[in-house]
Image (tube, rainbow, N blue to C red):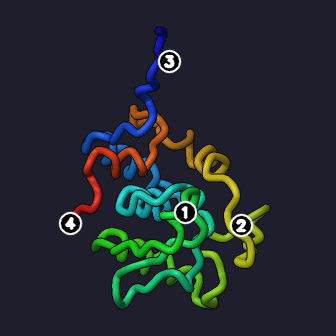
Amino acid sequence: MQFLKERRDIGRALSPEQEAGLLRQCGRSDSPLYPIVVLGLNTAMRSQEIKTLRWSQVDLIHKSLIVGKSKTEGGSGRLIPLNQSAVAVLVKWATRTPGANPEHFVFPACEHHDVDPSRPITSFRTMAQRNKGGWTAGAAIPRPTSHGNYQAGRIPRE
């Protein structure tokens, strides 16, 4: 019997050095890239869950959020506690959108500097490429997956 080759690049957690390099690189931009990466690293949310996150799902007072539609049935509607890093980045991000209502997306679509809070961001890749070289320029790491940190037991933290 012949087994399929196992992919070892999926679900691999970042080392602390790689995580620090990624956050440093993302922090150089005035885009939502930094808060998206912080949220992903600290919650293990899937990219689509982050893209479609609405302010009505976020409870900064009780430091939690509820996942909307998810890839898996068990993932939809799950309550995720937010650690200090995730709360801090969401509070700071919320100050950039003072007119947001609960049904607006946390990370809204933006085309040609025109923000549409009624539509979710569609691509992290495009945003990352505009971030002075992409996800990993200067960080020496592969494209990150927050779910890899979850699988490696690195979440929750703090």
Query: Element type at marker 2?
Result: strand
Q: CA distance from mark 4 to mark 1?
A: 28 Å
Q: Residue at x 61, y 52 (%)?
A: 124
Residue, x 70% and y 58% (percent of image)?
A: 122
Which one is nearer the viewer's eye here, 48 or 41? 48
Q: Residue at x 43, y 86 (%)?
A: 59
> On the rendered structure, is 152 left or right of 71?
left
In terms of image quadrants, where is residue 129? top right
Name the residue carrying label 2.
109
10 Å crowding of disc 4: few (<14), some (14-19), many (20+): few
Name the residue type under label 4.
Glu
**Which numbered mark, 1 or 2, is in the foreground of this view?**
1
Counting the numbered discs, the total is: 4
Q: Judge the density around disc 2: few (<14), some (14-19), many (≥20) Cα neighbours within 10 Å.
A: some
Q: CA distance from mark 4 to mark 2?
A: 31 Å
Residue on which disc 1 sits = 73
Amino acid type at image mark 3? Leu
The earlier-in-sequence mark between 2 and 3 is 3
Q: Is residue 108 left or right of residue 88?
A: right
Q: Which residue is mark 4?
A: 158
Mark 4 vs mark 3, foreground winner is 3
Q: Secondary structure at mark 3?
A: loop
**Upstream in the sequence, badge 4 or badge 3?**
3
Mark 4 or mark 1: which is in front? Answer: 1
Which quadrant: the C terminus? bottom left
Q: Mark 3 sits on what residue?
A: 4
Residue type marked 1 = Glu
Q: CA distance from mark 1 to mark 3?
A: 27 Å
* Image point (56%, 39%), residue name: 133
| Above or below, comparing residue 96 to residue 73 in the picture | below
